[in-house]
Image: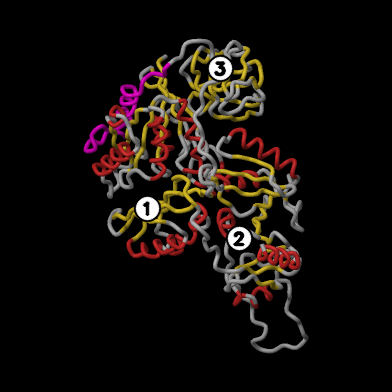
């Protein structure tokens, strides 16, 4: 059977996963009466809850006797490591663009990677049924983007398809609404070349890794040469060409719709999964025993943000989670780093703590949330940027991001002011639809930590921010942190309504009534710039005398609800987020007030 391998790449929320749903339904994979869900490729719990794709996944459909392997990729820059690896497996890419928004920062990031390795794109203008669609301008913007990214003449001569993935149609003419996706299928067959097959024995580059309760570790990649069968002896080579292990293939699986099915032989050009190896991982070459040279793997961009994961040492440690020791946490992080090449795990200088470096706050928050659901307890520090040194001058360099903000005209002033305070430079300002402005900044990653919440408050929830790694630049100097202090509990017990009611003029609370607290735990935000120790355990003194008006019911203001991302962005360097399966608490690193004073004096002297 003829083969085609394509990736679908686009900015977050432009409709990649919905398009894959449509292609699956119209290729005849499901029975007519079979029940199907929305966003079938987003199988992970967090993907469904957040409405985003986190892991790249493959599927396959058959159309006119041609098997088309489709790879659905994440749209967030934080998960760009997934996209960089996946592009090695395909021969073409569908670049999906919103008919109203046009190409966005993440589109630029992924397209630059695709053009660099020589893929010829198919541009698909999605959501053309929107009332504010502007397909002609969007196509021109895409052409300009490709030209700026040094596309070749062949890549600039791209075919264009218009349509609505949600409504299940695509057409070569924006004015003609069709009944199906045939125009897209035809363009893929005409425009994407069959996979190039290399001569020689079996070779496959590991692209993604998974696990199965029955088969163990499963490595997925494209067969570059030869073929692979069950019980065949293979070996794994590292990037440097060293032999990692020799083993036997227990199963060869191929994607058939939404499932993996065992096959008798994986042929050159097809995307298959191999079970049976215990040590081989992503970017390793799986090959026949006579092969000595490893296949070249695409370099992955370095991580820009790091956090310290430490053993939870609060007074409530071990009461909610089962996995609390440093050995168990280290083993789990090692497993994560195996499959996610964009993460870098190392042991920290502090005892029982580990440094985890990744692409952004969202990627690290997803990892923490996954571990929390698995029963882990952790203490997590404030995110810090990963600095680099310029070898020629010895100057410290910090990561800079390109930030694109779409905002209502009336709020653009406050956005420019706040980002200027965070050492950002404005690169562009232009209209973006009726009454809206698109602002483009180059801002240090340090200055963007915790800015998302502030932006939504300043713009009344109307702004949309997108960010993408731009490069390294000389250190921009100090950036002011949080303006307010915190309220800290001075004792252990359960919070009391009467005490919290009396503390309301000190600042908003972050906990409810009847919540377990301990000394050093952050229970609210102080209205002033300093930290304040308060007593939330003090009940009302009762007497046997009654007086009218003195026994009124206590009415409390609802507390600030801290999500994981909000908490990570909120804390300062001397604070931690305590993450357990049931709660997310904020606390000081040093719970004892005397230890805090000693640490503050030592840092002031330094």
Is 473 contained in the magenta span?
no
Q: Residue 293: which disc?
A: 3
Q: How much space separates mark 2 and mark 1, taking CA atoms? A: 27 Å
Q: Residue at x 56, y 43 (%)?
A: 358
Disc 3 or disc 1, which is closer to the eye? 3
Please tell me how crowded label 2 is: few (under 14), some (14-19), or many (20+) other residues with Cα within 10 Å.
some
Q: How is the image coloured?
A: secondary structure
Question: Regarding mark 2 in the picture, which secondary structure is present there?
Answer: loop
Q: Is residue 117 above or below residue 414?
A: above
Residue 92: where, in percent of width, then height?
38, 27
- How far is the residue under mark 3 from the one under mark 1? 45 Å
Q: Position of residue 274 (x, y in %)?
A: 58, 21
Q: Is residue 404 above or below residue 458?
A: above
User: In the displayed structure, does residue 518 sit left or right of residue 366?
Assistant: right
Which comes before the other along the chain, label 3 or label 2? 3
Q: In which quadrant of the rendered image does the C terminus lie?
A: bottom right
- Crowd around label 1: few <14 · some 14–19 · many ≥20 (10 Å): many
Q: Is residue 179 magenta?
A: yes
The disc placed on residue 440 is 1
Q: Which span of residues is magenta-colored?
A: 169-196
Between residue 557 and residue 191, name the one nearer to us.
191
- Disc nearer the start of the sequence (3/1): 3
List x then y, in percent, for residue 506.
Answer: 61, 75
Query: Does residue 362 appear anywhere in the picture?
Result: no
């Amino acid at each position: 059977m003829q083969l085609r391998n394509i990736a679908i790449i686009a900015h977050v929320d432009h409709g990649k996963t919905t398009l894959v749903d449509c292609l699956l339904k119209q290729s005849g994979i499901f029975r007519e009466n079979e029940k199907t869900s929305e966003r079938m490729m987003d199988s992970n719990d967090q993907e469904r809850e957040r409405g985003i794709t986190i892991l790249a996944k493959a599927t396959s459909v058959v159309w006119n006797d041609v098997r088309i392997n489709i790879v659905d990729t994440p749209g967030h820059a934080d998960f760009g490591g997934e996209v960089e690896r996946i592009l090695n497996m395909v021969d073409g890419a569908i670049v999906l663009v919103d008919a109203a928004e046009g190409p966005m920062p993440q589109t630029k990031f992924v397209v630059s990677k695709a053009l660099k390795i020589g893929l010829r794109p198919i541009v698909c203008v999605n959501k053309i049924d929107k009332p504010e669609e502007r397909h002609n301008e969007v196509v021109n913007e895409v052409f300009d983007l490709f030209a700026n990214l040094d596309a070749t003449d062949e890549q600039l001569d791209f075919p264009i398809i218009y349509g609505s993935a949600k409504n299940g149609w695509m057409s070569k003419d924006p004015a003609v609404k069709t009944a199906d996706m045939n125009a897209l299928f035809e363009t893929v067959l005409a425009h994407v070349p069959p996979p190039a097959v290399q001569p020689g024995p079996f070779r496959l580059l590991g692209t993604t890794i998974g696990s199965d309760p029955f088969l163990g570790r499963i490595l997925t990649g494209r067969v570059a040469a030869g073929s692979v069968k069950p019980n065949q002896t293979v070996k794994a080579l590292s990037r440097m060409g060293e032999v990692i292990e020799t083993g036997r293939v227990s199963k060869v699986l191929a994607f058939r719709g939404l499932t993996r099915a065992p096959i008798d032989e994986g042929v050159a050009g097809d995307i298959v999964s191999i079970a049976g190896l215990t040590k081989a991982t992503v970017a390793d070459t799986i090959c026949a025993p006579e092969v000595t040279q490893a296949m070249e793997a695409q370099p992955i961009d370095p991580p820009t943000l790091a956090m310290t994961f430490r053993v939870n040492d609060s007074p409530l440690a071990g009461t909610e989670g089962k996995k609390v020791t440093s050995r168990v946490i280290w083993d789990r992080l090692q497993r994560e780093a195996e499959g996610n090449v964009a993460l870098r795990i190392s042991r920290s200088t502090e005892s029982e703590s580990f440094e985890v470096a990744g692409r952004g706050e969202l990627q690290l928050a997803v990892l923490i949330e996954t571990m929390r659901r698995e029963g882990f307890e952790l203490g997590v520090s404030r995110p810090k940027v990963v600095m680099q040194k310029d070898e020629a001058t010895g100057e410290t360099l910090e990561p800079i991001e390109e930030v694109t903000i779409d905002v209502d005209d009336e709020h653009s002033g406050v956005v420019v002011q706040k980002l200027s305070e965070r050492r950002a430079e404005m690169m562009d300002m232009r209209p973006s639809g009726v009454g809206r402005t698109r602002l483009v900044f180059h801002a240090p990653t340090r200055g963007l930590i915790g800015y998302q919440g502030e932006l939504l408050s300043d713009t009344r929830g109307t702004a949309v921010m997108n960010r993408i790694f731009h490069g390294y630049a000389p250190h921009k100097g100090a950036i002011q942190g949080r303006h307010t202090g915190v309220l800290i509990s001075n004792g252990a017990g359960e919070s009391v309504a009467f005490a919290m009611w009396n503390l309301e003029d000190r600042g908003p609370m972050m906990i409810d009534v009847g919540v377990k607290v301990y000394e050093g735990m952050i229970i609210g935000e102080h209205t002033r710039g300093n930290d304040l120790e308060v007593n939330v355990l003090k009940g009302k003194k009762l007497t046997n005398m009654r007086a009218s008006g003195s026994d009124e019911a206590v009415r409390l203001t609802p507390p600030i609800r801290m999500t994981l991302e909000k908490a990570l962005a909120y804390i300062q360097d001397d604070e931690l987020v305590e993450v357990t399966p049931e709660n997310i608490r904020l606390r000081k690193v040093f719970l004892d007030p005397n230890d805090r004073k000693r640490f503050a004096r030592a840092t002031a002297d330094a």
